[in-house]
Structure formats: C-alpha cells, structure tokens
Image (spheres, grey):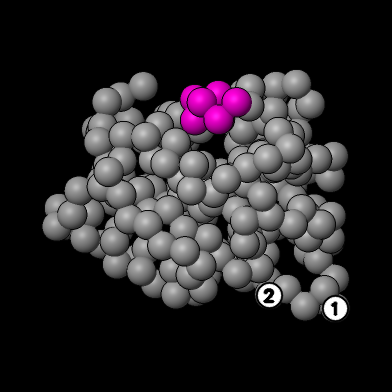
Amino acid sequence: MRERSLTLIQDELVDYDKAMERMTDLVGERQRDERPDTLWLLSHPSVFTVGRRTPLHHLPDPTRGIPVVETGRGGQLTYHGPGQLVGYLIVKLGEDEGIVDYVREVELRLVSALADLGLAAERRDTPPGSELLTGVWTSETGRKVVSIGMRQSRGVTSHGFALNVDGDLEPWHWAIPCGMPEADMTSLLRERGSADMAEVRAVVAAAFDAS
C-alpha cells in the first residue's frame, strides 16, 4: 500500500443529503488543491442508498418507512443507520493509480483495522461475470461486515465505506444488499459480542494514517 497521511474530520449523526453537499464541497477543494487528502468519519440516520444500476426488486418495501436515496457512487443498495461507521475518502489519486487500485487499498486498510479490533477479515476477488465482491468479509463466518462504494472525478475520490459496528442489522433483511441476495450482513457486535464506537473510530483512523 502507498504511504499517505490524511486529515481527519469527525462528526456524529449527519443527514445523508447534507453530508453529500459537504462531500461535494470537500471534493472541489481537493481538486483545486485547497485541502489535503481527507477522511471524514460520521454516521447517518436510517437511509437506503442505491446506485444507478440497482434493480427495482432489490429495493425495500416503502411501508418500512426508511427513505431510499439515489447516489452517485459505485455499487448497488446499501443501508446506513446509527451504529454504523461511515468513512468518506477525499483523496487525490496518483497518475499511475485508478479508482479500482484505491478501492483495493481501502479494503486492505480496513482488514488491518478489523484485525486490530480482534476480528479476522478478508477482501475477495470477483470471478468473471459475477457481481462485484467489493467490501470486507469475516474470515471465520463468511459474513459481510464492510460495504464499499466509491467513484473518482478529475482524479479525486469520493464516497467510501460503511463498517457495521453495533447498529440494528434488521433493515438489511428488508432489501437486497450490494446486489447479492445471499449476502449475510454482520457487525462487530454480532461477531465479537461487544463493540465500542469510540475505539473503532480511533483504530480505523489509525489504519488510514488520519489525524
């Protein structure tokens, strides 16, 4: 992995639409070299976000009462909610570096963070013709604990990852996550029996050399 230090921004619950507005501003600042590479850690109130290719039958029943918002990131449906740590990465890529290269780096950094938190995890390669297996899975149980969806514009990344820490996992059962009906979404709390958001924030920030 490349050595790169990031500036850290931390917030608690931020409405998804407001977060997207601020992220757009941060990306513009990075494109103009007005700010350094940045990791923004936060959480969102309950919301489903969908990519442009998400099939209608993957969406939740509207009677569940959780908003569904279309987003410009890669990937398909993802759930965000309290107890989940979201990380938005605003990073200027090197001339020899593409978004796929950086997503792989993000996966590996999160695998390292989870190991430090006592959970063995792994990234997966995608077989030809399969739905993208971007994200991080637990090594022992094979459950998905991190979702990743990113894009890049004018050489700068946006969006990022969602790590399930100690939130309610039930909403994941109301839709088809990440385009994979077979995906069993999990959390640090489910896998380890305990989880502390403050500890997770600190360990994830350290994994990205963010301060």
Q: Are marks 1 and 2 in contact (CB under 8 Å)?
A: no
Inspect the image, locate mark 2, and give the three-letter code of the amino acid beneath it: Pro
Q: Label 2 crowding class (10 Å Cα cut-off): few <14, some 14-19, many 20+?
A: few
Say which amino acid is labelled 1.
Answer: Thr
Secondary structure beneath label 2: loop
Relative to 77, say whether 138 is above or below.
above
Is 104 rendered above or below residue 172?
above
Q: Is residue 91 left or right of residue 131?
A: left
111 left or right of 179 in image: left
Mark 1 = which residue?
63
The mark found on residue 142 in the picture is: none
Q: Main secondary structure of the magenta part?
A: helix
Q: What's the magenta region?
A: 111-118
The quadrant of the picture occupied by the N terminus is top left
The residue at the point 21 percent across, 60 percent down is 29
Q: Badge 2 is on which residue? A: 67
Measured as percent of width and height from the top left, residue 105 is found at 43, 29
In front of the other: 61 or 99: 61
Pointer 1: residues within 10 angstroms few (<14), some, or many (20+)? few
130 within the magenta span:
no
178 in relation to 104, above or below: below
Residues at marks 1 and 2, CA–CA distance in whole angstroms? 10 Å
